[in-house]
Image (cartoon, helix red, strand yellow):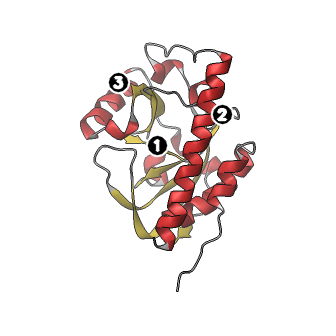
Amino acid sequence: MNTKNLIGAVALVTAASITTVIAMNQGETGAPPAVPENPAVELPIELVFAQPFTLEEAATHYWRAEQPSYTSGLLVVLEAGPEWLNPRQTAEPVIFVGDQTLDRINNGYPSGQLVGIVPGMTLDELSEAPIYFGQPELPERVDAAYATAELRAAIGGGLVGPGEERVSLVAVDGTAALDYSDLMYQASFLVEKYSPTEEDLISGFRVERVEFK
């Protein structure tokens, strides 16, 4: 296994472990709240942070049915009710930015602060892209037609993008990364800032790269 795959595997295993623990805790505290009929309108999401990035090596967006590759996009931090970010053991409201599914990096529970990737999007596009919860589904089953329908429904419900003023307030200069694993290392500092209780996830993303000779 090469270095990139090793680090990526560690990060994915770490994230899966945290999700399992939270799901178990959720079972101890009772069932999650029922999803409202129109989550896009009834469950607001706020844009807290945005940073463009570029990758030297293309990554795969696994949170889409098509699994497209990308070499640029945005790192974002979103704020929402923590009870809606807490992972479920079944389909859950999918987070969209425009017509793109969010690649969730951390759980965002109990902080209510979620770090994620919006593949292929620019800051200009972000200003016009509504950020919202879609209907419950598994993100990896969302395709272009489904995403377009969700966006139309959100716009029909009155949702609009955060606007240029909001984006300019929360955006910082771009960052460059070698690959997805390197991007996760950089994103770990956002998780540490906005959701510091997710210590195991942060540590997993900071596993030292090993050079095999």
Give how far across and how far down residue 210 sits, in percent.
Answer: 59, 75
Q: Is 187 situated above or below 109?
A: below
Where does label 1 land, which residue?
102
- Tag 2 or tag 1, which sits nearer the N-term? 1
Q: Is residue 81 visible?
A: no
Label 2, secondary structure: give it. Answer: loop
Q: Is residue 199 left or right of residue 185?
A: right
Inter-mark Cα distance, 2 to 3 = 27 Å
Q: Residue at x 39, y 37 (%)?
A: 139
Left or right, 194 with respect to 24, comes to right
* Local SS, label 1: loop
Question: For mark 3, what is the residue?
Answer: 153
Residue positioned most to the left: 145
Disc 2: CA contacts within 10 A as few (<14), some (14-19) or many (>=20): many
Name the residue type under label 3: Ala
Q: Is residue 29 left or right of residue 129?
A: right
Dot in front, 3 or 1 = 1
* Numbered circles on residues, count: 3
Q: Amino acid at mark 2?
A: Tyr
Disc 2 and disc 3 in contact, CB within 8 angstroms: no
Residue 187 visible in this rendered orientation of the protein? yes
Q: Upstream in the sequence, badge 2 or badge 3?
A: 2
Residue, disc 2: 109
At 72% from the left edge and 51% from the top edge, which residue is drawn? Answer: 192
Give the alpha-carbon distance from disc 1 to disc 2, as whole Å. 16 Å
**In the depicted view, which residue is nearer to us: 207 or 145?**
207
User: Residue placed at 57% from the left, 80% from the top?
Assistant: 211
